[in-house]
Amino acid sequence: MPQTKEKHFHKNPVLELNQAIDSGSLYQVRQMIKTLPTAGIAHLLESSPPKTRSVLWQLVDKDAEGEVLQYLNEDIQNDILSSLNAEQVVKLTEGLETDDLADILQQLPQQVMAQVLRAMDQQDRLRVESILSYDEDTAGGLMNTDTIAVRPRHTLDLVLRYLRRYDSIPEMTDNIHVVNRDDELLGLLPLRKVLVSDPNTTVREVMSSEIEAIPVAMEATQVAQLFEQHDWVSAPVVDDEGKLLGRITIDDVVDVIRDSTEHSLMSMAGLDEEEDTFAPVIKTARRRAMWLGVNLMTAILASLVIYLFQDILDRVVYLAILMPIVANMGGVAGTQTLTLVIRSLALGHITPANSRWLLARELGVAGLNGMLWALVISVIAYIWLDDLQISYIIGAAMMINMFIAALAGAYLPLFLKRINVDPALAGTVALTTVTDSIGFFSFLGLAQIFYL
């Protein structure tokens, strides 16, 4: 029996489904899909080319489509939603939590979103509209309005009887919110205390009043940091007056952390973290074209620097051989600093009080590494080319470029963030421009001084 389970564990669901589809056994495919959780079905859809994905979506149970949809990336969500009318979208998303529904509706054109909202019942519409009024990257955009609140004067026995009125309580409910008549948050009542305390005890006696509520306008990344620091499962969201608006749960925070990580990784290559892996050729080429164009402009700028020193390159051909080494070393050193600073900004580690210390540290590291590798390349250049002058030139140029690269890697993200430009998106291109241009200019400029 254990051997059978192990064999099943190593099977590739995507490969099995593709084989079943190719063989025309759609009944087998449908049965295989039914055995998967909704997140697993979404993963299969994202892992399949468009033709296979279309077949798989048709085989998903209608009752599960909404649950599957919320796990898909925005590109695939848009493809599915674009083929539906307002009534179909309402039916598809029926039963989803308010925050998940709001995330899906934000992918729709404004006109279609308005039609969907009008087709919903009044209570659901008001809940969704309350979330849509906030930016999706804030606590208000993350929160779910489905909360349970009690008054401090109530007894725990009354709270238990109140809870039993529900068919089920909201998922990931670890605390009950304690509010006054004006819905101002007074504290949290842990469910574990409700279960083990004397039923005649009042809420006020056992509730925790030392709470750290999340302001509705707080950025999503800051919310994620608070959850990480406090190991929260959920946290209340309040407005400027301290009134309870909703709550954020750990599953939404995990999505924020995952999206932030994917964004940082994909942005360095000019890609969208929500991009469909199996998007059509034209659509993918169009998205990547602009970023390639930006990189072409930076490459032309570096080439213009080389063009300024055409005469010295014609006289000393060895310079063209060694030139890429200087730019490459500066690029690597700068990227190390840039990556560290971008990560620290995302985690909230860098403040105006410690940014200068970090800069001094990075310049110190660049100075030590610059001297070390300048000495190494100088010796290599002398042994290779038997030219003492060129060994001095490349050593000095490497030190200059690695020092400038560290300076650019430390300050560029801070500058870009100050002017509201994503450092992860623009930092790499800007750094490459600096290290290539400075590397070529310092190396060829020093060569011109020595040889002409």
Image: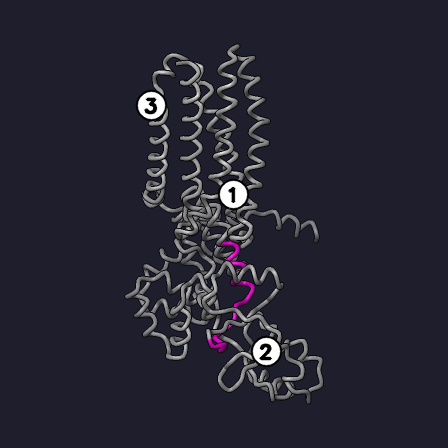
Which residue is rendered at x = 46% and y = 74% of the image?
A: 240
Badge 1 density bin: few <14, some 14–19, many ≥20, Cα 10 Å: many
| Residue 117 position by quadrant | bottom left
Disc 3 versus disc 2: distance between alpha carbons? 69 Å
Q: In what element is the residue under mark 2?
A: strand
Relative vertical location of residue 138 with respect to residue 54 in this rendering, above or below: below
Depth check, front residue: 178 or 367:
367
Q: Which residues are magenta?
A: 241-259
Badge 2 density bin: few <14, some 14–19, many ≥20, Cα 10 Å: many
In the image, residue 397 lies at what x, y percent?
48, 25
The amino acid type, in three-letter code, at marker 2 is Gly
Q: In what element is the residue under mark 3?
A: helix
**Number of residue marks:** 3
Which residue is rendered at x = 42% and y = 35% of the image?
A: 434
Q: Mark 3 or mark 2, which is nearer to you?
A: 3
In the picture of the structure, the residue carrying the numbered disc 3 is 307
Q: In what element is the residue under mark 1?
A: helix
Does the image show residue 22?
A: no
Which residue is rendered at x = 36% and y = 55% of the image?
A: 79
In the image, residue 269 lies at what x, y percent?
43, 41
- Magenta stretch encompasses residue 242: yes
Disc 2 versus disc 1: distance between alpha carbons? 40 Å
In the picture of the structure, the residue carrying the numbered disc 2 is 187
Relative vertical location of residue 241 with respect to residue 431 in this rendering, above or below: below
Relative vertical location of residue 307 with respect to residue 202 in this rendering, above or below: above
In the picture of the structure, the residue carrying the numbered disc 1 is 339
In the image, residue 256 lies at what x, y percent?
50, 58
Which residue is rendered at x = 67% and y = 81% of the image?
A: 206
